[in-house]
Amino acid sequence: MIDVHTHCLQPEHWGEEHRRHWQPVYGKEWRRYTVEEFDAAMVGVEAAIVFGIKATMAGVHTPHQDVADFCTRAKTKTFGFMALDPSDADVLDQLQEGLALGLSGIKLYPVLAGFRPDDPACFPLYAEAERQGLPILWHMGATPSAIGDLSVTQPLLIDGVARHFPNLKQIIAHMGHPWYLDTIIVLRKNPNVYADVSAAFAKSYGGYQAFMNAQEWGVTNKLLFGSDYPFWTPAESAELMRSLARKEMGPFPNIAPETMESIINRDALEILGLR
């Protein structure tokens, strides 16, 4: 099992964003998560991609060094992704700093950073990522934050990036929730765009729609397993996926168990060129 979506966010990385905008929705503080807790949760995971968030507008910043240190301390095989914000004037310098620390991909968060993924002003970052072979993992879809801009987090915007940078490996996180079908249409036409399933399994009806649409459109091979740790462990995530496949949907088609097993066991490292 390869987990492509795990967080190493610590409370200080959030600034005031979580306390002001997330805590009222989720009803709890963001606590500190230790490397030991991470390793315990990753039992049975061959490797995990780890990252934080950078959104200058929202005051959220996970330093590259913190990600690198977390990965160094973890017993689990990890690949650290650098959290960047294309709105920063020195974003290309930040990318080079991440490379110097051994980070092997990029996490982008348009909805809190406030940039459009298909804005040509971001293209120099994508060009350098493509040149360096750095996959980009996008948070796409919903946010509980009142300051988040939903107009820049629609998965169809990734199509514009893929058309300009067809060799850039990209992952749409959370299957673009709640715009699952839009995500699937983007995956179908762009060979190097994938989606991770983190959190898509959390809502019974929404999860059914997400995986059934992928199954019917023939793009389940473009879906990568992600737990969204610490929200769920990999084991919890896999069980929620399997439980969706066990549901009898009456007159509607069922999700095939082999659909879920193929996602859970997919070699995402090979796909992303991270081995």
Image (cartoon, rainbow, N blue to C red):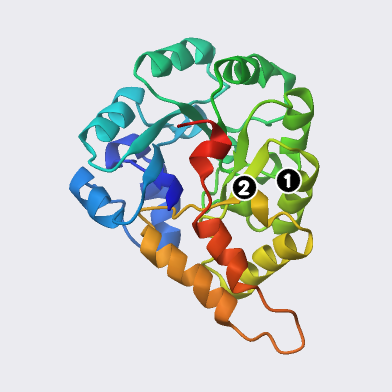
* Neighbours of disc 1 within 10 Å: few (<14), some (14-19), many (20+): many
- Amino acid carrying label 1: it is Leu
On screen, residue 146 above or below 12: below
Residue 187 is labelled as 1
- Quadrant for residue 233, please give it: bottom left
Q: Is residue 15 shown to the viewer in this render? A: no
On screen, residue 58 above or below 64: below
Secondary structure category for the residue under label 1? helix
x and y, in percent, of residue 128 in the image: 59, 14
Q: Which residue sits at x=52%, y=43%? A: 268
Q: Quadrant of the C terminus?
A: top left
Q: Which residue sits at x=65%, y=16%? A: 127
On screen, residue 121 above or below 225: above
Q: Which residue sits at x=33%, y=35%? A: 13
Q: Which residue sits at x=63%, y=69%? A: 206
Question: Which residue in the structure is indicated by mark 2?
Answer: 195
Residue 150 is labelled as none
* Neighbours of disc 2 within 10 Å: few (<14), some (14-19), many (20+): many
| In-image side of 170 versus 78 (left or right) | right
x and y, in percent, of residue 143 in the image: 55, 51
Q: How many marks?
A: 2
Secondary structure category for the residue under label 2? strand
On screen, residue 221 above or below 118: below
Residue toward you, 246 or 7: 246
| In-image side of 160 versus 142 (left or right) | right
The CA distance from mark 2 to mark 1 is 8 Å
Mark 2 touches mark 1? (CB < 8 Å): yes
x and y, in percent, of residue 162 in the image: 74, 31
Considering only order in the chain, which callout, 1 or 2, is on the residue closer to the N terminus? 1
- Amino acid carrying label 2: it is Ala
| In-image side of 229 versus 274 (left or right) | left
x and y, in percent, of residue 247 in the image: 59, 83
